[in-house]
Image: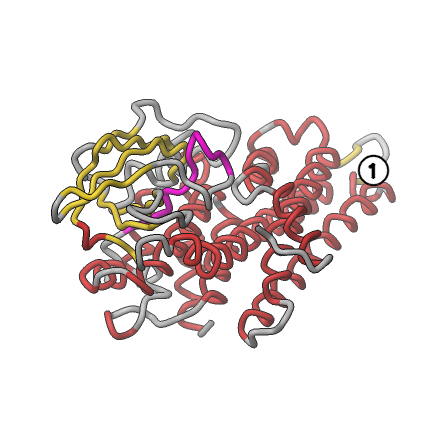
């Protein structure tokens, strides 16, 4: 990533930090997302042919990781936007691609459903041909940026045939779409506007299809899975980095006045922080190797993609557990800064493909078995 984009990312990260507390109370990071668009970072991975920056997955990793150090919700919004953009760049209309490249269009994924849970590759929602249009009916359980994204990369059963899925580009304002009234008020990632979205005969033009009918599974596995897993690993990596820095700062500044020493003077505390640092650095190395494997089309690239999200999610849970333990009672106060990271880190464990599903996939890959 060039120095220019690194500097732009730093300025946006500072803005994300400014609004992090407000976002954690449930506010969507509108100002930060607008700044991402104005800086050209929403169009970071868009082709120069449509006015984008022409950067790849590694550049998106840098942005998501850096944002996650300051605000997990903002980082996850960017993660989903880049995943959707990767699909739209490959199969979407030029008008939408230009709007994304210009920073005027936020997109996201709409895969998970109540009927298939985290097994996002097998939607139960349907699509029916209706002349020159298509009618969609589905109950999407979680859609990041649901009220703020301009479009959803939407999955359904195919119009015809026995394949698993077909993908569509669905504008948020499509008649027949209903976003849940209640805002998201969960454990973590409270500001990413994650809400259920229901389609009841939502009508879109047949030309809104992304790739061929029935080709959705291939796009999910070939495009979405690598982008989402790797960017999710970057998200977890940024949270870990923040947890290590905030924990070390806290114990270095917190004193035992009667003894004239700090919490950092305790060997047990330093050992815990060492474990946090090692876990964070292990995952940075795995993430870098995953990008190298993808970039050179190495034989183990798929295995690395599966490992990246599973490893980072588990490590982030460990690191933030230790952060809460080391910072003690003070960790429950928001000003220390680790309890929000602790809560946000849990998302990676349960977002599909979940860590347990990834362990199964990894085991199959190591044993030479087909994933599906």
Residue drawn at x 55%, y 45% as measured from the top left: 353
**Extreme residue in the front direction:** 161
On the image, the x and y values in percent for residue 134 come to: 20, 44
Q: How is the image coloured?
A: secondary structure
Q: Quadrant of residue 282?
A: bottom right
How many marks overall?
A: 1
Q: Residue furthest top?
A: 182
Q: On screen, 212 above or below 243?
A: below
Of all residues, the one furthest to the left in this rendering is: 131
Q: What residue is at 44 percent from the left and 30 percent from the top? A: 115
In this view of the protein, which residue sits in the foreground, 121 or 40? 121
Left or right position of 31 against 226: left
Instruction: Answer whether residue 356 is magenta in the image.
Output: no
- Tell me the element at label 1: loop
Which residue is located at x 60 percent, y 33 percent?
339
Taking the image as shown, residue 107 lies to the left or right of residue 135, namely right
Percent x, y of residue 205: 16, 48
Image position of 89 with respect to 320: above or below? below
Q: Which residue is mark 1?
A: 260
Residue at screen point 53% across, 53% down: 229
In this rendered view, identify the residue nearer to me: 16 or 169.
169
Q: In the shown orientation, is residue 322 left or right of residue 90? A: right
Bin the neighbour count of mark 1 within 10 Å (Cα to Cα): few under 14, some 14-19, many 20 and up: few
| Residue 179 against residue 19 in the figure, above or below | above
Q: Quadrant of residue 257?
A: top right
Q: Which residues are magenta?
A: 106-118
- Magenta segment main secondary structure: loop
Residue 156 horizontal/vertical position (percent): 34, 43
Residue 312 coordinates in the image, percent (x, y): 63, 50
């Amino acid at each position: 990533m060039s120095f220019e984009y690194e500097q732009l990312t730093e300025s946006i990260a500072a803005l994300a930090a400014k609004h992090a507390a407000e976002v954690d109370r449930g506010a969507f990071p509108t100002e930060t997302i607008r700044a991402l668009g104005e800086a050209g970072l929403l169009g970071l991975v868009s082709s120069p042919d449509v006015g984008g920056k022409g950067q790849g997955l590694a550049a998106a990793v840098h942005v998501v990781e850096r944002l996650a150090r300051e605000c997990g919700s903002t980082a996850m919004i960017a993660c989903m936007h880049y995943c959707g953009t990767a699909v739209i760049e490959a199969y979407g209309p030029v008008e939408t691609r230009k709007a994304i490249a210009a920073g005027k269009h936020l997109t996201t994924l709409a895969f998970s459903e109540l009927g298939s849970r985290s097994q996002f590759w097998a939607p139960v929602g349907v699509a029916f041909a209706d002349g020159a249009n298509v009618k969609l009916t589905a109950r999407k359980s979680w859609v990041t940026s649901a009220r703020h994204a301009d479009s959803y990369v939407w999955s359904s059963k195919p119009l015809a045939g026995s394949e698993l899925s077909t993908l569509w580009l669905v504008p948020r304002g499509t008649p027949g779409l209903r976003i849940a009234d209640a805002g998201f008020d969960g454990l973590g990632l409270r500001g990413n506007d994650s809400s259920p979205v229901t389609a009841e005969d939502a009508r879109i033009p047949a030309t809104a299809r992304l790739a061929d009918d029935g080709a959705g599974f291939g796009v999910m596995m070939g495009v979405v899975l690598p982008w989402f897993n790797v960017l999710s690993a970057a998200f977890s990596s940024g949270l870990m980095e923040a947890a290590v820095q905030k924990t070390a700062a806290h114990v270095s500044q917190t004193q035992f006045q009667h003894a004239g020493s700090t919490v950092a003077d305790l060997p047990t505390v330093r050992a815990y922080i060492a474990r946090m640092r090692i876990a964070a650095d292990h995952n940075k190395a795995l993430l870098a190797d995953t990008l190298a494997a993808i970039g050179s089309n190495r034989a183990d690239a798929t295995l690395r993609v599966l490992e990246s999200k599973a490893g980072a999610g588990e490590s982030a849970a460990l690191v933030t557990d230790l952060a809460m333990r080391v910072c003690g009672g003070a960790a429950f106060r928001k000003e220390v800064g680790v309890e929000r990271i602790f809560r946000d880190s849990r998302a990676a464990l349960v977002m599909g493909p979940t860590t347990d599903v990834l362990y199964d996939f990894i085991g199959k890959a190591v044993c030479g078995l087909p994933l599906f």
